[in-house]
C-alpha cells in the first residue's frame, strides 16, 4: 500500500473499527472488497474530448447530442486523450475498461469513411490498452456524418444510405471482435442510432420495419461470443426526435430477446420519473446479459456527471443483491465540458465504484427480515444501514489500491491541469 504515513495509519485504524462494526451486522468486509476489485467499469473515451473524435467529417455533432461548456484543456489528439485517461485511471481504484467510439479511429491523416474502417485503425488503442491492462468496449458512430444529417440512418427510406450504415455496423462488430481477441477479454459492441422525428410522424411502422431489416443484416455475419458481445440501445427521446424514436425501449427489448443480444439500459434514456434499477431484474428474466450506460439526467437526457445519488445507489444495489455482477456490463456515458474533464471521469467512476461497495456491505439481516415477512424490521434495518461506517471502508479500499484517499485526488488533477492541460 505504499509508504506508511500518519494519514494512512488513521485510515487503517478507522477501517479496523468499521470492519468490527460490520462484522457485528453479519457482513464480511474483506470478502466484500475482494468482490469489488473484480467488477470493472468501462470509462467512456468521449468525456475527454467532448465527443469530437479524430475524423474530420465536416458536420456538427448532431444526433440529439450536445456538449456544453468550454473548459480549457480538451484532448485534441489520440496521444493527449490517452494521457488524460492514464491520469484519471491513476486516481480510480480497481482495474477497469475503456469504451471507444468508431470516430476515434487513427487513420494516419488519411480520409477513411466509416464503411471502410478496419481493426488496423484501432491498433494504437489496442496496444495502449494492453500496456494499461485494460479491456476495450466499442460503439459504431451513427452521428456527426453527412449521411446522418437528416436524423435517419439504419431506418432511412433511402436504401443507399441504409446500406452505408449497415456496412459500418458490420465492420464495427469485426473491430470489436478483434479488440476482444487481442486483449483476451470480450468486447461489448453497442449499437445506438439517433433515428427519429421532431414532430408527430404519419408512419411509425415502416421505419421500424426497415430498422429490423438493417439490424438483421448487421448481425448476420457470425462472430465468436468469446470475443464480441452485441448490444442494442433504446432511447425515449432526443433533441430532434422528441415525438418519435424508431429504436424505442419496447422495440429493442423485443429485438434483444428474439435475436439473443444484450440490451443496453442508459440511465438518461427514460422518463425522468423512471429508474433503470427496477428494470434490471425484469429484463434479466429473459436476457442472460445486459449493458448499462450510467449517466445522470437532469430534467432531460442531459448526460451529467454521475453523482452519489439515490438512483445510482439503487442501480448498484440491484446488481449486487441479485448476483448480477458478472452478467451486467457497467459503462459510463456522460460528457461535461463545463468542468475539468479528468475530474469528471474521476468523480463519476469513483461514485459508481462507491455505490457498488455500499451494496456489497448491505447487512444480510435486511433480506432475512423480508423473507420472514417482518417488514417493520426490514425498514428499520434499511435506515440504520445508512449510518454504518462504509466511508472508512471506502478510504481503506482506495489506500489498498494505491490511489488517493478522500479529496486528495483533486490536487493531482490540478497539477495535471497546470503542467499538461494549460499547455494545449
Image (cartoon, rainbow, N blue to C red):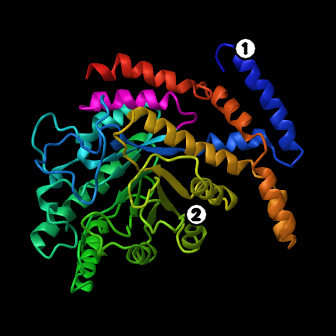
x then y, percent, for residue 236: 38, 70
Residue range of the region highlighted in magenta in the rendering = 74-95
Comes first in the chain, label 2 or label 1? 1
Residue 173 in the image: above or below residue 134: below
What residue do we see at 55% from left, 69% from top? 279
Q: Can residue 173 be seen in this view?
A: yes
> Can you say which quadrant of the picture contains the C terminus?
top left
Residue 244 in the image: above or below residue 109: below
Residue at mark 1: 6
Is residue 155 on the magenta stretch? no
What residue do we see at 16% from left, 69% from top? 162
What secondary structure is found at the residue carrying circle 1? Answer: helix
In front of the other: 252 or 317: 317
Q: How far apart are marks 2 and 1 (CA)?
A: 40 Å
x then y, percent, for residue 318: 64, 60
Direction front: furthest residue: 299
Q: Is residue 131 visible?
A: no
What residue do we see at 69% from left, 51% from top? 359
Residue at mark 2: 277
Amino acid at each position: 500500500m505504499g509508504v506508511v504515513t500518519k494519514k494512512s495509519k488513521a485510515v487503517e485504524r478507522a477501517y479496523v473499527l468499521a470492519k468490527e462494526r460490520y462484522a457485528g451486522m453479519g457482513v464480511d468486509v474483506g470478502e466484500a472488497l475482494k468482490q469489488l476489485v473484480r467488477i470493472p467499469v468501462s470509462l467512456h473515451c468521449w468525456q475527454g474530448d467532448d465527443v469530437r473524435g479524430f475524423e474530420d467529417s465536416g458536420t456538427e455533432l448532431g444526433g440529439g447530442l450536445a456538449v456544453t461548456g468550454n473548459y480549457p484543456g480538451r484532448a485534441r489528439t489520440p496521444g493527449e486523450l490517452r494521457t488524460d485517461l492514464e491520469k484519471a485511471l491513476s486516481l480510480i481504484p480497481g482495474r477497469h475498461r475503456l469504451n471507444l467510439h468508431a470516430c476515434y479511429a487513427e487513420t494516419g491523416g488519411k480520409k477513411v469513411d466509416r464503411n471502410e474502417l478496419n481493426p488496423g485503425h484501432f491498433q494504437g488503442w489496442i496496444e495502449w490498452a494492453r500496456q494499461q491492462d485494460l479491456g476495450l468496449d466499442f460503439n459504431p458512430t451513427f452521428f456527426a456524418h453527412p449521411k446522418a444529417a437528416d436524423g435517419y440512418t439504419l431506418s432511412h427510406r433511402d436504401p443507399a444510405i441504409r446500406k452505408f450504415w449497415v456496412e459500418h455496423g458490420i465492420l464495427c462488430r469485426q473491430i470489436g471482435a478483434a479488440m476482444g481477441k487481442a486483449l483476451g477479454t470480450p468486447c461489448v459492441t453497442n449499437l445506438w442510432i439517433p433515428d427519429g422525428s421532431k414532430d408527430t410522424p404519419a408512419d411509425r411502422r415502416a421505419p421500424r420495419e426497415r430498422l429490423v431489416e438493417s439490424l438483421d443484416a448487421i448481425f448476420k455475419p457470425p462472430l465468436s461470443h468469446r470475443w464480441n458481445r452485441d448490444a442494442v440501445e433504446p432511447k425515449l427521446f432526443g433533441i430532434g426526435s422528441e415525438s418519435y424514436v424508431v429504436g424505442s425501449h419496447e422495440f429493442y427489448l423485443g429485438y434483444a430477446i428474439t435475436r439473443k443480444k444484450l440490451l443496453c439500459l442508459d440511465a438518461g434514456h427514460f422518463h425522468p420519473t423512471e429508474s433503470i434499477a427496477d428494470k434490471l431484474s425484469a429484463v434479466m428474466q429473459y436476457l442472460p446479459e445486459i449493458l448499462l450506460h450510467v449517466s445522470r439526467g437532469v430534467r432531460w437526457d442531459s448526460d451529467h456527471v454521475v453523482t452519489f445519488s439515490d438512483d445510482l445507489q439503487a442501480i448498484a444495489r440491484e446488481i449486487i443483491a441479485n448476483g448480477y455482477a458478472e452478467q451486467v456490463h457497467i459503462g459510463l456515458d456522460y460528457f461535461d465540458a463545463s468542468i475539468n474533464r479528468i475530474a469528471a471521469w474521476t468523480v463519476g467512476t469513483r461514485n459508481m465504484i462507491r455505490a457498488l461497495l455500499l451494496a456489497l456491505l448491505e447487512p444480510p439481516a435486511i433480506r432475512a427480515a423480508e423473507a420472514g415477512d417482518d417488514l417493520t424490521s426490514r425498514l428499520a434495518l434499511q435506515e440504520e444501514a445508512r449510518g454504518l461506517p462504509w466511508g472508512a471502508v471506502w478510504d481503506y479500499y482506495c489506500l489498498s489500491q494505491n490511489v488517493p484517499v478522500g479529496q486528495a485526488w483533486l490536487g493531482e488533477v490540478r497539477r495535471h491541469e497546470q503542467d499538461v492541460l494549460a499547455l494545449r
